[in-house]
Amino acid sequence: MATGKSQDTGLLTKLKSPFLNISKFLREVYTELQRVVWPSHDETYGFTVVVIIAVLAVAAWVGLWDLIFGRLVGLATGGG
């Protein structure tokens, strides 16, 4: 029959295991971040402009369909 102490040790090990290698993980994250090729200021600006234009285009598209379907539902329900 198993003793309570061995069960406690196993439980303690299971609870501590995610935190045992946290410093190793953080070192690896730092190393990987050193390898990243960050975009230049001009590239970041260009990407930002593209994203803003895409968001505005999608917002206009969704707004247009919302207006169309809103009017159709209003006409169908007599709300005018």
Image: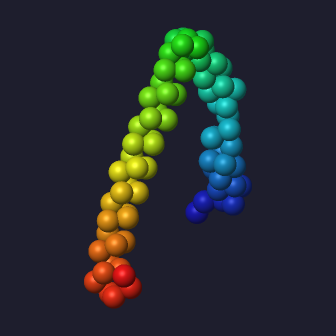
Give me the residue at 35% from left, 51% from top: 61
Q: Which color scheme is applied?
A: rainbow
Depth check: give the residue in front, 25 or 18.
25
Specify the quadrant that holds the N terminus. bottom right
The percent coordinates of residue 62 (x first, y second) are 37, 55
State the residue lying farthest toward the front: 80
State the residue lying farthest toward the bottom: 78
Instruction: Say how many tags the image has.
Output: 0
Depth check: give the residue in front, 47 or 67.
67
Residue 9 seen anywhere in this rendered image of the structure: no
| 37 shown above or below 69 | above
The percent coordinates of residue 55 (x first, y second) are 45, 42
Give me the residue at 52% from left, 28% from top: 48
The percent coordinates of residue 69 (x first, y second) are 32, 69
Specify the quadrant that holds the C terminus. bottom left
Depth check: give the residue in front, 43 or 68.
68
Give me the residue at 40% from left, 57% from top: 63
Residue 47 seen anywhere in this rendered image of the structure: yes
| 26 shown above or below 74 | above
The percent coordinates of residue 74 (x first, y second) are 35, 80
Residue 61 as seen in the image, left or right of residue 9: left
Toward which corner of the image does residue 78 lie, by quadrant? Answer: bottom left
Give me the residue at 68% from left, 43% from top: 16
